[in-house]
Amino acid sequence: MLHFAVESAWTLIAERSTDINHPNAKVGEQQGSGVRDIPTWFGGKTMIVAAAPDASYALTEYGNDLYSAGYQSWDMSNPANPVFMDQLAVPGQILSDPAHQKAYLGNPRAGNRTSWMGARMSLFIPTPVEEGGKYGYAAMGGLGFYVVDISNPAQMKVVSHLEFEPSVAGTEGDYIDVSQVKQTGLVYFSGYPLNEECFEPYKDVHIIDVSDPAQPKKVGVLPRPVPPKEAAFTDFCQRRGSFGPKRTGAYTQPGIGRQGILPYNFYNAGLQVFDVSDPQQPAIAAYFVPPFKEDDVASYAMGNLSHSVYVEYDRNLFWLFTNHGIYVLSSPVLGQPSFAPPKQAWPPRPASVRDSQ
């Protein structure tokens, strides 16, 4: 289900079901997954979400999830009346389709009862369609990495695909950083751990060259974080909790990104800031590893020590969100921090909106 509200009053102005085949079905009769994680919407006409419209999107292995989600595009020209435009599936998602079944059975993960298949997040889009953006990038779990043509959101098209060796358990393809792609032609593709204490293979952050969208190429991986020498353990697997990459922030954060810098939250390894100014020799330029605080956190939440990072690139501040609180961090990697109010509102607002506030 999609819900839309006015910011100042939080008044519901519209709602839509992602069950596109039965848009008027009552609650309890709707099919499909609903929207997964964060929609991609820059405030213009086009919004894209990850969603499975019905129970036929069922070719997956992960036992706690019923769906292999694809992508839906919605026309948000009038936020009070969102209009469905298109549903995109990639080969190997639809149970009732022989071609999809064949593609799925050709995947080495088929039958392992472990791998997450399909999308968990929306398309990763460096440039909005309304500003001339043509491509979105898809992290489809065990189905791999896709380049998608979004120039006509009503007819999204797969451009190319990359497969990766199985890394069972966890999510093998969840997130794609696109902050560097305009300058370098590179995106960064990763999954994340779902198990604690490394009871699954380490999830690499893969570097992919998409300068030719029709032929993406694997370039390498980011280095695996290691504890400082003074730590009581030699590998983060020896520390409690999950260990692996999550995300580099949000597309809503001021400045979106900074060339050459990738700040990943790494669960029990805290914040790991990568210097990717030389993609052939990426390195960890800064880190902050928070403590575990047993007295402040329920035992069932202890494993996810740090779960997200938000970066104010306009004020040179990292905000690291953990299971016991929020840390505000600075580093020479970003530059001198500013604690004064931001000079400009983010996201930018049209003059008509500013005048009304």
Image (tube, grey):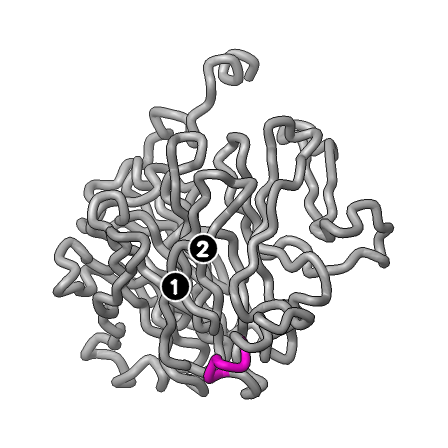
Give coordinates of residue 334: x percent, y percent: 22, 46
Which of these two is toward me, 294 or 108? 108
Q: Is residue 68 left or right of residue 43?
A: right
Q: Residue at x 13, y 65 (%)?
A: 281
Q: Main secondary structure of the magenta part?
A: loop
Q: Is residue 115 above or below residue 188?
A: below
Asked whether residue 106 is drawn in magenta, I would say: yes
Q: Residue at x 22, y 69 (%)?
A: 220
- Asked where in the image residue 221 lies, by quadrant, the reply is bottom left
SS of the residue at dot 1?
strand
Left or right: 143 as drawn, with respect to 216: right
| Residue 66 visible in the current orientation | no
- Marks 1/2: CA–CA distance: 8 Å
Q: Check contact, mark 1 vs mark 2: CB within 8 A.
A: yes
- Rendering quarter of residue 276: bottom left
Which residue was labeled with disc 2? 158
Query: Residue 183 vs residue 355: left or right?
Result: left
Image position, residue 172 (x, y; %): 44, 73
Residue at the image point whose x is 26% and y is 64% from the top:
217
User: Which stretch appears magenta?
Assistant: 104-109
Relative side of 299 to 129, left or right:
right
Q: Is residue 114 above or below residue 282?
A: below
The residue that mark 1 highlights is 161
Count residues near mark 1 (Cα–Cα under 10 Å), then give few for <14, some for 14-19, many for 20+.
some
* Magenta-drawn stretch contains 293: no
Residue 181, visible in the rendered structure: yes
- The image's mark for residue 62 is none
